[in-house]
Amino acid sequence: MIIDIHRHPVDRGFFSDNYWKGFARMALPILKRMGVEADIDMIINNIVPVYYDTTGEKHIAAMEEAGIDMTVLFAFDTGLMVGEPAVSIEEQNKAVFEVARRYPKKVIPFVTMDPRRKNAKDFVNKSFEEHGARGLKLHPGAGFNPESKETLALVEIAARHAMPVLIHTGPSIPPTSSKYCDPMYLDEILLRFPEVNVIAAHMAYGYRDILFSLGMNRPNLFTDIAAWQTTARDRWHDFAETVKHAVDHFGPERVLFGTDNPYLWPVLTEPKYVEAVRDLAVKAPEHTRISEKDVQMILGENAKNLLKL
């Protein structure tokens, strides 16, 4: 079984114009290195729409092509930092729940909301009790501190419902902030709620040494390999070495497969990313190689156990 622990619904109305302009500015130099001439308007109006999928059809098709059996889906609440989108975060969450209802054997919904919103506690609790949410996603890039009382209140609700919490770590894309995305900010949650399994997204990118050190000492801390497709494509040996370090520090049972798609679709197809992970057991240099059993755990068995499937 292959389970993608990290995937998003995307639509133009899910983010403010300010967000999309920041996203486009970030994409410009990346596209230039790929030999694509573009400007901000072209990215927003011609490239970004490739990502749009609020009903799940594109995601399901990409998953089936790659042999991905199930995925965790969640939105991204940026409104308090960069401007409210046309579609409220409540409606975005409801769209996620609807996709999960449409594809109950394929899509696992997580609820997300900025903890500073006045209705956050009620909405998250109701999402668990009435809408079938199977976990909580938090993104400190929206400007909140994971150690704040508001954040801890949402984690407490997840704890009460025995749900995992997935939290972004590592630099956050502009115009969102990286200030609170250092994995050290997770420590209060990890210590206060030892019964809650916390997934640090993206292996924390450039903050991964701190994350890996925490991984050795916090048994309720997991990590995912979402959004490492560029490294897997261009510097596969670096990718292999990083995953091996994650396995060495966390143990193979706390490393999870993820894509962060649709954002990485233009970088590496989902079948090729799955292949890059499978190759870790057969093509990596000896000092960075992991076992076939480890690969199977990362690709799906760990998420299956974590999500109690």
Image (cartoon, rainbow, N blue to C red):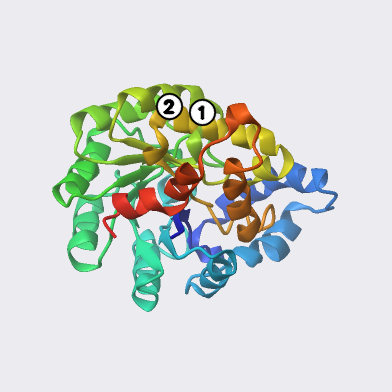
Label 1 crowding class (10 Å Cα cut-off): few <14, some 14-19, many 20+? some
Q: Is residue 84 visible?
A: no
> Picture coordinates of residue 96 (x, y %)?
39, 66
* Corner quadrant of residue 184: top left
> Picture coordinates of residue 218 (x, y %)?
30, 27
* Corner quadrant of residue 217: top left
Which residue is denoted by mark 1 in the rendering? 245
Mark 2 secondary-structure assignment: helix
* Corner quadrant of residue 285: top right
Q: Residue at the far bottom: name it.
A: 102
Q: Is residue 13 rendered to the left or right of residue 241? A: left
Amino acid at pointer 2: His
Q: Is residue 223 rendered to the left or right of residue 260? A: left
Q: Nearer the viewer, residue 86 or 46?
A: 46
Residue at (73, 53) in percent of width and height: 40
Q: Are marks 1 and 2 in contact (CB under 8 Å)?
A: yes
Amino acid at pointer 1: His
Label 2 crowding class (10 Å Cα cut-off): few <14, some 14-19, many 20+? some
> Picture coordinates of residue 205 (x, y %)?
54, 33
Q: Which mark is residue 249?
A: 2
Q: Nearer the viewer, residue 185 or 298?
A: 298
Screen quadrant of the N terminus:
bottom left
Residue at (51, 45) in percent of width and height: 292
Mark 1 secondary-structure assignment: helix
Residue at (20, 35) in percent of width and height: 193
Residue at (18, 48) in percent of width and height: 157
Q: What separation in Å lies between label 1 and label 2 (alpha carbons)?
A: 6 Å
